[in-house]
Image (cartoon, grey):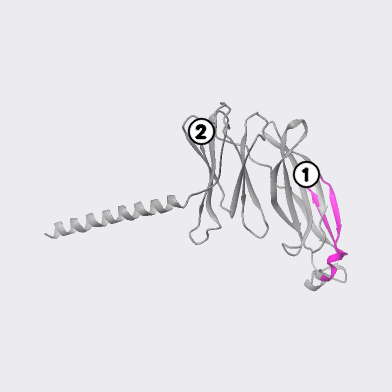
């Protein structure tokens, strides 16, 4: 009798667990949202694929996506998935950035932080081969405050140095204790951000490249000192820097 009762209890537990798991799976499936969807030939076979950018939001934070991914239903009837980072929002562009006459998938995920940093991805599915083409790394630079309410930025790639007069922020910096009588109280670096934007642009000879934008900030994220722009071209399997521009920002 005890064995029969035990079997009934066990069966009930397993049925309940299966039901709960099924409901949970349905709930998880229902969370997937389609951010964008379009059709284009991204394999080079002259047939269209369905390319969808999808995300799964947090239950308690609908404005933030805990998972973001690209889903491609290809003309060969197979489905390809490209996972991306989590973020507040995401965007996808189909553009030929490696110049092979077939469109690539260029994705941007906004991290949602106060710095406005974005994470980018570039994938190819030419000939149905999943290829990570990568994106350029943000520019490396040494950036520091100098005595006399000044700052200096030196770009590692070009070796060029840029000087900035920050006297319009004198009162603000003195109040914060950064300077005393025009001299730094201690050596202080500027904050060099990653890409705040990385977007396709038209280059010469009909080619498309990427233009990145980075902010260099001082004592706070809102204290933008300079905007550093970089232009890139993809050639022979790698990204090449073709131009940089550094612009000083006025105090708010």
Looking at the image, residue 23 sits to the left or right of residue 100; the answer is left
Q: Are marks 2 and 1 in contact (CB under 8 Å)?
A: no
Q: Is residue 177 above or below residue 102?
A: below
Q: As rendered, which of 118 and 76 lies closer to the eye?
A: 76
Magenta residue check for 205 = no
Residue under the point 73% across and 51% down: 214
Residue under the point 75% across and 64% down: 219
Residue 63 pos. (x, y %): 56, 58
Q: Of tags 2 and 1, which is closer to the observer?
A: 2
Residue under the point 86% across and 65% down: 168
Magenta residue check for 167 = yes
Q: Which residues are magenta?
A: 148-171
Label 2 vs 1, first from the N-terminus? 2
**Which quadrant would the C terminus be assigned to in this image?**
bottom right
Q: Is residue 97 above or below residue 86?
A: above
Residue at image mark 1: 157
**Which quadrant would the N terminus be assigned to in this image?**
bottom left
Residue 189: give its label. none
Residue at image mark 2: 74
Q: Residues within 10 Å of mark 2 (few under 14, many from 20)?
A: many
- Outermost residue, front side: 38
- Outermost residue, top side: 45
């Amino acid at each position: 009798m005890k064995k029969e009762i035990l079997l009934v209890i066990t069966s009930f537990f397993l049925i309940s667990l299966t039901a709960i798991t099924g409901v949970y799976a349905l709930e998880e499936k229902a969370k997937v949202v389609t951010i964008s969807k379009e059709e284009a030939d991204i394999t080079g076979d002259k047939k269209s694929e369905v390319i969808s950018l999808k995300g799964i939001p947090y239950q308690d934070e609908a404005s933030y996506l805990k998972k973001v991914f690209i889903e491609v239903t290809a003309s060969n009837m197979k489905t390809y998935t490209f996972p991306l980072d989590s973020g507040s929002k995401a965007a996808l562009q189909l553009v030929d950035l490696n110049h092979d006459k077939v469109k690539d998938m260029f994705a941007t995920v906004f991290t949602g932080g106060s710095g406005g940093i974005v994470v980018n991805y570039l994938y190819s599915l030419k000939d149905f081969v999943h290829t990570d083409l990568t994106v350029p790394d943000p520019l490396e630079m040494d950036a520091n405050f100098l005595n006399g309410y000044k700052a200096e930025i030196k770009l590692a790639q070009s070796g060029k140095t840029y000087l900035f007069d920050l006297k319009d922020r004198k009162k603000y910096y003195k109040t914060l204790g950064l300077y005393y009588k025009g001299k730094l109280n201690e050596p202080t670096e500027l904050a060099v951000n990653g890409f705040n934007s990385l977007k396709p642009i038209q280059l010469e000879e009909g080619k498309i490249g990427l233009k990145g934008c980075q902010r260099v900030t001082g004592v706070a994220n809102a204290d933008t000192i300079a905007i550093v722009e970089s232009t890139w071209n993809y050639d022979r399997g790698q990204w090449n820097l073709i131009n940089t521009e550094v612009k000083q920002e006025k105090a708010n």
